[in-house]
DNA sequence: TACTAATTGAAAACCGTTTTCACTAAGGTT
DNA sequence: AACCTTAGTGAAAACGGTTTTCAATTAGTA
């Protein structure tokens, strides 16, 4: 569990941290520092926004959460699903799913060959509608 | 040419705009608003940072430039290469190359199937070393 | 040449993030 | 259980990039 993992890395287990960690871990979608703050304060009222930033940074360093890049902003985080690196985000509700990117290798190799670049990292992120939102959208009629 | 295109979209052709547009168009790498400002001021000294932001927004709306997402920040822009949507960025010098992402379709279809998501957009960005920087790095000996 | 609405640059406002700092308390030690 | 050390806390101030405001300017048209 995350709280365990923090202790093992020499971090103290404070109410502020617990509140932030539990909030982020419980969110199925990417959330911003301010959202974390609002939500985590119900677990630990005196929480300061500063502690949210510090804890998020810490969790990112430990690889437990990752930053999500959106067209509208890049300050949101999701909990990282072990071994799965790529994100699929619902454009309606924000719910995040993960998938393996192994199948990218052939594409990457061919791009490397044609451009001459030595490719190190890759980022792939997909956007769409999750199952729930597909049916929800149907019921309301199709939006623009 | 870009300046033409601006006129055709009802924008006036001012020295400030020309300076910004020419600067961005001439850059082989993604540049931040501040970098644009510094560089464009050599073309039009009295340029204000505000005009840089406004012009960048305008160019983005017209689809002439696109925002580049980096682990370290997401405020840089590159000129969009016609038809090519995906970016390959040199981690040494920042030079950008483009490539087609068509070959992603099979991967996307299979992910769509396994997750149930209806996938709309995709973002793929690669990071690596361009040819020049590969040889440059060799000459200096390998860095960490 | 005159007109007018778009555009400009400076300054102020804004807002999310980071730093500072004196205080608190987690967790090991006794 | 009481103590001690130092990591961690929250409030407030500082910061820095972006946006807004506004009076002055000017591009493009009549």
Image (cartoon, coloured by chain):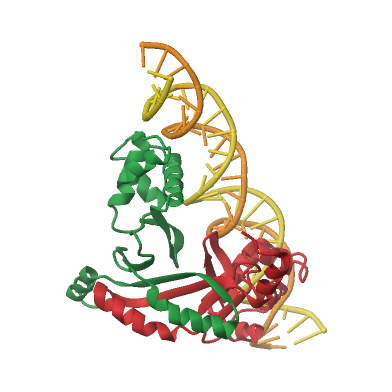
Chain colours: A red, B green, C orange, D yellow
Q: Quadrant of residue B101?
A: bottom left
Nearer to the camera, B94 or A16: B94
The residue under the point 51% across, 73% down is A126
Q: Residue at x 39, y 65 (%)?
A: B85
Q: Is residue A17 visible?
A: no
Q: Is residue C13 above or below residue B66?
A: above
- Marker count (numbered): 0
At x 43%, y 37%, the residue is: B10
Q: Position of residue B46 (x, y in %)?
A: 36, 33
Q: Please state the horizontal and vertical placement of residue B56, each as a whole percent of the image.
A: 42, 48
Of residues A14 and B32, the one nearer the viewer is B32
| In the rendered image, the vertical position of residue B25 relative to residue A18, given as above or below | above
In front here: D14 or A141? A141
Residue at the front extreme of this rendering: A141
Residue sitting at 67 percent across and 67 percent down? A36
Which quadrant holds the C terminus of chain B?
A: bottom left
Q: Is residue C18 left or right of residue B37?
A: right
Instruction: Please tell me in which quadrant of the rendered image residue A130 appears.
Output: bottom right
A64 left or right, relative to B131: right
Question: Left or right: where does residue A46 sit relative to residue D7?
Answer: right
Q: Is residue D19 above or below residue A60?
A: above
* Closer-to-camera residue (C7/A2): C7
Say if residue B72 shows up in the picture.
Answer: yes
Question: Left or right of A65: which side holds A3?
Answer: right
Position in image of residue B40 (x %, y %): 32, 43
Residue B8: x and y in percent read 38, 40
């Amino acid at each position: 569990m995350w709280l365990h993992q923090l202790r093992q890395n020499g971090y103290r287990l404070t109410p502020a941290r617990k509140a932030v960690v539990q909030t982020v871990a419980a969110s199925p979608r990417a959330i911003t520092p301010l959202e974390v703050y609002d939500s985590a304060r119900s677990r630990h009222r005196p929480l300061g926004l500063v502690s949210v930033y510090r804890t998020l940074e810490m969790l990112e360093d430990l690889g437990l959460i990752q930053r999500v890049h959106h067209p509208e902003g890049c300050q949101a985080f999701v909990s990282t699903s072990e071994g799965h690196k790529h994100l699929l985000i619902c454009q309606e509700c924000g719910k995040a799913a993960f998938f393996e990117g192994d199948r990218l290798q052939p594409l990457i190799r061919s791009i490397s060959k044609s451009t001459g670049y030595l490719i190190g990292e890759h980022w792939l992120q997909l956007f769409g509608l999750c199952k729930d939102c597909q049916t929800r959208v149907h019921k309301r009629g199709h939006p623009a």
